[in-house]
């Protein structure tokens, strides 16, 4: 009788063991493999702030890749920061090497003719003028006139009859997309200004104003065809 009970206990134990094994098997089968992680092509790839970097990933880097712009000078204008970053693009990364204060359009960013807004998006340098002009020399109709103008670093020093002027160097821009194709005809430039006090705030009539010393340095860094990206957020 005792042997018969032991046998029954062994049968039950084996059965329970099989159930337990099957349950573990089922639990293993229910575990799904984790999806393979894919790394985006561009992630925090510049030394700029994250928001601007994300904008460049979407709008600038693909253009540079598809047009073979590795190791070439690229300009990135931040409307929010009122700065132009001068750097180069390599291995999917823009690295800013120099940063200058600017002043973009007082009326914001846009593309309408006579809007006095700064165009945004992908652009490039169309031409340059003033390589032999002196600091503070005035331009008119794409030519320097030999007239020297006073540069104002404080707004309260500006005479009531003074106007904003184009000084020292001009870097003419043209648009690369459908919406900003009229940039060249709108006569949009980087240029030196007599209103240096306005830099750091949107104060221009659509052009990108710079300190005269800075635009002289920028003039030497760029050439016809240099890519410019303007982030129209302020």
Image (spheres, grey):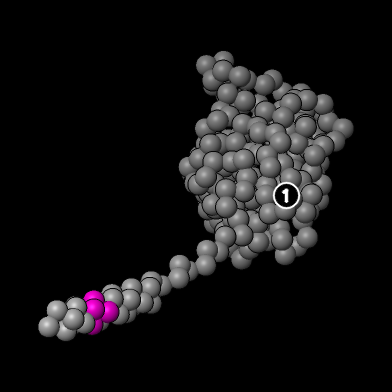
Residue beneath the point at 67% across and 47% down:
94
Give the structural element (helix, strand or loop) at label 1.
strand
Quadrant of residue 40 within the rendered picture:
bottom right
Residue 118 is left or right of residue 61, and the answer is left
Front-most of residues 230 and 113: 230
Residue beneath the point at 67% across and 28% down:
211
Question: Horizontal and vertical percent for residue 139?
Answer: 75, 35
Front-most of residues 160 and 54: 54
Instruction: Examine the rendered structure and indicate whether residue 82 appears above or below residue 93.
Output: above
Question: Farthest right residue?
Answer: 132
Question: Horizontal and vertical percent for residue 25?
Answer: 36, 77
Question: Horizontal and vertical percent for residue 164?
Answer: 61, 31
Chief SS of the magenta region: helix
Quarter holding the N terminus? Answer: bottom left
Residue beneath the point at 75% across and 62% down:
67
Residue 200 is left or right of residue 216, and the answer is left
Front-most of residues 36 and 136: 36
Residue where numbered disc 1 is placed: 89
Residue 19 is left or right of residue 111, and the answer is left
Residue beneath the point at 68% across and 54% down:
92
Task: Judge whether residue 94 can be spotted in this image.
Answer: yes
Question: Horizontal and vertical percent for residue 115?
Answer: 53, 50
Question: Farthest left residue?
Answer: 1
Residue 115 in magenta? no
Residue neighbourhood size for the residue with mark 1, other residues' Cα within 10 Å, grouped as few (<14), some (14–19), many (≥20):
many
Q: The magenta stretch spans which residues?
A: 10-14
Front-most of residues 36 and 99: 36
Task: Judge whether residue 140 can be spotted in this image.
Answer: no
């Amino acid at each position: 009788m005792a042997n018969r009970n032991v046998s029954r206990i062994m049968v039950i134990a084996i059965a329970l063991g099989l159930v337990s094994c099957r349950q573990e098997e089922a639990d293993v089968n229910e575990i799904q493999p984790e999806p393979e992680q894919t790394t985006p092509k561009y992630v925090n790839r510049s030394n700029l702030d994250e928001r601007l970097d994300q904008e460049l990933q979407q709008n600038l880097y693909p253009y540079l890749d598809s047009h073979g712009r590795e190791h070439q000078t690229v300009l990135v204008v931040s409307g929010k920061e009122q700065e132009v970053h001068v750097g180069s693009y390599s291995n999917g990364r823009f690295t800013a090497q120099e940063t200058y204060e600017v002043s973009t359009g007082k009326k914001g960013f846009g593309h309408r003719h006579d809007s006095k807004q700064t165009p945004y998006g992908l652009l490039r340098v169309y031409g340059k003028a003033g390589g032999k002009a002196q600091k503070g020399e005035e331009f008119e109709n794409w030519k320097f006139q030999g007239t020297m103008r006073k540069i104002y670093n404080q707004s309260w020093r500006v005479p009531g009859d003074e106007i904003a002027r184009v000084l020292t160097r001009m870097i003419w821009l043209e648009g690369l997309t459908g919406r900003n194709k009229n940039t060249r005809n709108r006569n949009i430039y980087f240029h030196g200004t007599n209103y240096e006090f306005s830099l750091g705030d949107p104060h221009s009539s659509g052009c990108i104003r710079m300190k005269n010393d800075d635009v002289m340095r920028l003039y030497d860094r760029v050439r016809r065809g240099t890519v410019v990206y303007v982030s129209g957020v302020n």
